[in-house]
Amino acid sequence: MTEFLKLPWTPRYTQSPVDASLQDEQSLLGYWSLAATIAFTVVVYALEGHLDARQKSAYETTNFPVALETIVASIDKERKQTKSAKDEDNDDADKGNKPLLPQLQAKFRNAQAYGLDKINFGMIASSYDTVESIVFLLAGFLPYAWDVSVQAGNKYAGWTADDEIKNSLVFLALVTVVGTITSLPFEMYSTFQIERKHGFNKQTIGLFVTDKLKSLLLTFAIGGPFVALLLKIIKAGGEYFFIYVWGFMFFFSVFMMTIVPVVIMPFFNKYETLEEGSLKKRIFELAATLEYPLTKLFVMDGSKRSSHSNAFMFGFGRNKRIVLFDTLMEQVQEEEILAILGHELGHWKLGHTLTNFVVTQLYFGSAFYFFSLTFGSKDLYAAFGFNDPNSATPTLIALLLFFQTLWAPVDKVLSFVLTVVSRVNEFGADKFSVDLGMSKKLQSGLCKIHLENLGAMNPDPWYSTYHYSHPPLVERLSAMMKLDKKSK
C-alpha cells in the first residue's frame, strides 16, 4: 500500500526527504486513519445494504397491508357519513370524495413496482459510490487532483504553490466537474428510465442539460467566493478561527435562505401569484388566524419536470411567503390544501423551523471547533498522500479529509438523531392541524398525495426508522384517528 500511495504523480507531497523515524510515526498513525475510514465506509455500506434488502422484500409483497386497509376503510366510512348536501350536487366534490381505499388498492402494485425499481437502482448506486470512495482513497485522488490544480494554476496563471486559495478554487472546480461526470449516468437513468417509466418525469433532455449547466454555474458563482472567504477566515483567524468561521457560516446561512427562493429557484421554475378566489382568500385568513405574516402566495410550475407534488414556506420576519406546486392543486381539493398548509404552518407555530435553524448553527459550530483541534495534525493527512513535513497540508484538503474521516461517524449519528426528531415534529404538526379542526381533510389529503406519488404503502419498519424523515402514512393516519377519538 505504501508504494501504491507514492505514485509518480504525487511528487509534491510524497517524495521530500524526511527523517525515517518521523516518517514511520506518521505512517503508523496515518494508515490507522486510512484503515478506520475504509472500515467505517464498509460498515455503513453493509448496514444500509441490509436495510435496503429488508425494504426490497417489503416491496416484493403483493398483499395490501392490513393495517393500512383497516385505517383507510374507517376514514372512508367517516367521509361518507359527513358528506354534505352541497357535495351531493357538486360533480367536482363528488369526484374528490370518492372512497380512498379502492384507489389505494388499485395503485398498490404500481407503488410496489416503483419502489422496487428505486431500491434496486439505489443499491447499485450505493455499491458504486462505496467502491469509488475506497478506490479514490487508495489511489490518492485528492493529492493527484491538488497537484493537477497547482500545475494548471502555475502554467496558465503563473501562480505558485503558495497561492493556496487560488489553487483551492481550481481544485474545487476540478473535483466538482469530476463528481458531476461520475454521477451523471445515475441521474439520467433515474430521471429518464425509472421516473419516466412510472409516469413522473416530464423533463426533456434539453431541460435536463440546461438545469445541470445552471447548477454548475451557480456552484461556481456562489461556491467559489464562499470557499475563498472561508479559507481566508481560517488562515487569518488564528487559534480561535472556529469562532469567526461559525459567525461567517451563520451569516452565509441567512444569506442563502434569503436568496435561494427569490433569486436562485426562479432560475429553474416559474412562480406566479395565485389567482384571486376562494382558495387564496381562505389561505390568507388561515395565516392571519395563526398570526403568520403572509405577504405573497405563489404557484410553481413543478409539472414541467415531474408530476410529484409539494408545498413549502419561506421568508424572514414580516415577509413570509407560501409556494404551492401546480401538481398539488390538481391532486387534492381546496379543503385538503388548507389542511396541508395547516400542517406546514404548525411547524412554524411550534417553533420547528427556528429550532432546525439553531440546530444547524450548533452543528457548524461543533464541527469547526473539532476541526480546529485536528487542523495542525500532519499525522491525520499522511496516509492520504499529504505527508511532506516541510509543506503544510492545504486548508481545503484538511477540511475535506476531516469531514471524510473523523467527523463522518459523528455526522452519521447526528443525521439519524435528526431524522428521529423530524418524525416527532411531523406528528406534532399533524396534531396542530387536527387541533384546527382539519383532521379529516388532512387524512384524505395525505392519502391522495401518497396515491398520486406512489408512496410506499408497506415500508419495512427498520428501513423507515433509519431513512424516513416523515413517518409512514399508516402511522400518521393512525395517530390522527386516535386524536380524533380522544377529542370526542
Image: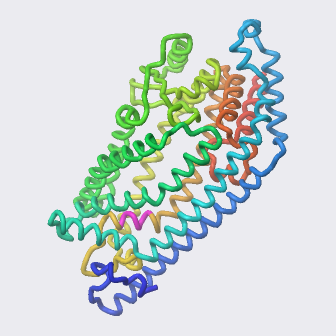
Count the numbered circles shown. 0
Residue 247 in view? no
Q: Position of residue 132 (x, y in %)?
A: 50, 68
Is 140 one of the magenta-colored residues? no
Instruction: Tell me the residue at 60%/65% (across/down).
Output: 45
Instruction: Tell me the residue at 62%/55% (across/down).
Output: 121
Side (left or right) of 465 relative to 250: right
Side (left or right) of 398 relative to 484: left
Residue 305 in view? yes
Q: What span is colored magenta in the figure?
A: 398-403
The quarter of the picture where residue 207 lies is: top left
Instruction: Tell me the residue at 55%/46% (across/down).
Output: 191
Q: From the image, which quarter does the C terminus lie in?
A: top right
Q: Position of residue 163 (x, y in %)?
A: 19, 65
Q: Height in image: 30 above or below 132?
A: below
- Front residue (pair 161, 132): 132
Side (left or right) of 294 relative to 479: left
Q: Height in image: 1 above or below 292?
A: below
- Front residue (pair 264, 95): 95
Q: Position of residue 425 (x, y in %)?
A: 60, 39
- Front residue (pair 36, 64): 64
Q: Position of residue 431 (x, y in %)?
A: 66, 30
What secondary structure is the stretch in magenta mostly built from?
A: helix
Colour mode of the rendering: rainbow
Instruction: Farthest residue to the left: give it.
Output: 158
Instruction: Farthest residue to the front: give it.
Output: 205
The quarter of the picture where residue 167 lies is: bottom left
Side (left or right) of 218 relative to 84: left
The quarter of the picture where residue 106 lies is: top right
